[in-house]
Image (spheres, grey):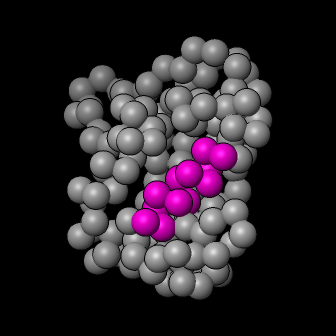
Amino acid sequence: MTATTLLPEGWAPPIGYSNGIAVDRGRIVFVAGQVGWDAQQKFHSEQIAPQFEQALRNVLAVLAEAGGKPEHICRITAFCCDKPAYLAARKELGAIWRRLMGKHFPAMSMIFVSDLLDNPGKIELEATAVVP
């Protein structure tokens, strides 16, 4: 699989994500929204950073079931119901990202919502990957 980052001519490079990813071949894997609970569906924190880390670990665990790795993720959509907490935690979230994803930055969207289904969830991540 060859993944190419898409950056239109004259555009400033985005920070922490890609505007688009093109993939030439592979198996598409869709990962449903994952919240910050463990394998037994228990939250261990009400804070956004630990929930983000667990949600990302959950995405990666589901992806691994399909033989995928972090670098196979082409798109992540994040749903967050606490914008001030997200903004305050950006540096910590970046460190978590680099620890789990390295310097791989897929196409991403951040959507702020009024609430999530699973309480006390603060953030939910869904992903699309292409596994060679």
Residue 74 coordinates in the image, percent (x, y): 56, 35
Q: How many marks?
A: 0
Residue at the spot 31% in from the left edge and 50% down from the top edge? 94
Residue at the spot 69% in from the left edge and 27% down from the top edge? 131
Left of 21 or right of it: where is 92? left
Position above or below: 42 against 100 = below
User: Can the viewer see residue 112?
Assistant: no
Residue 55 included in the magenta stretch of the image: yes
Position above or below: 128 against 9 = below
Residue 28 coordinates in the image, percent (x, y): 74, 33
**Magenta residues, start to end:** 50-61
User: Main SS of the magenta segment?
Assistant: helix
Residue 60 coordinates in the image, percent (x, y): 61, 44
- Residue 117 occupies quadrant: bottom right
Position above or below: 31 against 43 = above
Q: Quadrant of the N terminus?
A: top right
User: Can the viewer see residue 96?
Assistant: yes
Residue at the spot 28% in from the left edge and 77% down from the top edge? 84
Q: Quadrant of the C terminus?
A: top right
Of residues 58 and 128, the one drawn nearer to the viewer in this rendering = 58
Residue 118 coordinates in the image, percent (x, y): 64, 80
Residue 119 included in the magenta stretch of the image: no
Position above or below: 124 against 17 = below
Left of 47 or right of it: where is 31? right
- Residue 119 occupies quadrant: bottom right
